[in-house]
Image (cartoon, rainbow, N blue to C red):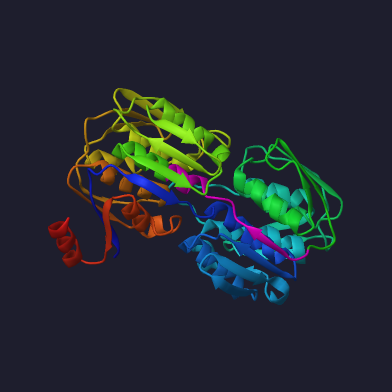
Amino acid sequence: MEQYVIKGGTPLKGSVNICGAKNAALALIPAALLTEEPVVISNLPDVSDINILLDAIAAIGARVERINRHKVRIVGATVSQLSVDYGYVDKIRASYYLLGSLLGRFGEAEVAMPGGCVIGARPIDQHIKGFEALGAKVLLENGQIKTTATQGRLKGNHIYFDVVSVGATINIILAAVMAEGNTIIENPAKEPHVVDLANMLNSMGASIRGAGTDVIRIKGVDRLHKTEYTVIPDQIEAGTFMFAAAVTGGDVTVKKVIPKHLESITSKLVDIGCEVMEYDDSVRVVARGPLRATQVKTLPYPGFPTDMQPQMTAALTLAQGLSTVTESIFENRFKYTGELNRMGAKIKVEGSSTAIITGVKGLQGAHVSAPDLRAGAALVLAGLAADGYTEVDDIKYINRGYENFHGKLQGLGASIVKVESEEEIERFKKMA
């Protein structure tokens, strides 16, 4: 099993290029199936979630041509089945976006019910509410979600989400772009990847206004056409490297980003004592002195992102004073704190939503396991700051969302390797 082995204590310095946003790409790939014409998507991150979703659409008949590592050509004209195999949904929840795109184009779709995960059940009730409002019949049978447009084509409608849901917002946009008439979505998610989806669909001939605001208005069109589109930069990858600078006392410039998307992250880095400089398409983070304690609560965009909560917590373990982190998006997202405590952190979780962190002077290397994607990244950050060696297991989770994570960290001066055997671990420790 692959592991990361880290020798901590080196301040990260230099610059790193950020990849395309995984969460945006996971919505854009299903959107490409809404037309029979070819769609070219550039700046795709080369991570396992993206590769699995490309395999999933190929399995239902779409033609998928890898132009290069970060660029793909998708032709949806050859889609021959409207049921997505459970094996793909089991691996990545975003497979359920194929419900919206297949239902929107063909009037029916069947996808296995997404399973829960360690950071919460993530119910799909708002997805179902939206599909039904558009005139679809939704059945849950034997673990399958079966959707059918009762009149052959979906009908536009006024939809109000009871809670802000990124997944439901994306799925209903995909379903509504070719529905008959107008659709209004109130209380939608405003995340940058929701806006990115709307921008790509508009480049294909859709009529979507208001993405990123409190109300999205969609005028249904009869058909969509080909396009070439570039995925936005990954806000969470960028934030992870920004916090890597903070925990190691480093000086890191993240390049190829949209600084506005990082404002909530930047604000918290300033709160804990870092210096942050913004440029046109890059952000520099300098950590000169001890980190300071703060309070943070995760919120839908433009608030502090839940996917940055573990990395923030890792930094606060080394901040002077008492910090609190409140998780308002997902339950059960603090399971990783036990691993940080094994490294010498002092974190007490109250209920399922609040972590109280007493800053310590230093962390110690330990053997830890990544329980999920972002928690895994946080454990790597803690290992970079710790004395001695840290071994991180289950890095398959980290590979879901970070392209060449250890290679990019090495480029900033980190002492980190990916290994597959005890012999490689011992070899690294002798050389480090």
Front one among 44 and 256: 256
**Above or below, comparing residue 28 to residue 192 in the picture:** below
Residue 57 shows in this picture? yes
Which residue is pictured at 28% across the width and 50% down the height? 414
Which residue is pictured at 37% across the width and 27% down the height? 273
Quadrant of the image occupied by residue 102: bottom right
Instruction: Give how far across and how far down residue 36 sits, in percent.
Output: 75, 71
The quarter of the rendered structure image containing the N terminus is bottom left
Q: Residue furthest top?
A: 321
Quadrant of the image occupied by residue 315: top left
Front one among 144 and 428: 428
Q: Which residues are magenta?
A: 225-240
Instruction: Give how far across and how far down residue 156 sits, in percent.
Output: 82, 50
Which residue is pictured at 29% across the width and 39% down the height? 248
Residue 334 shows in this picture? no
Which residue is pictured at 87% across the width and 51% down the height? 181
Front one among 415 and 54: 415
Instruction: Give how far across and how far down residue 247 sits, in percent.
Output: 32, 38
Instruction: Give how far across and how far down residue 352 sits, in percent.
Output: 41, 35
**Above or below, comparing residue 258 to residue 97 in the picture:** above
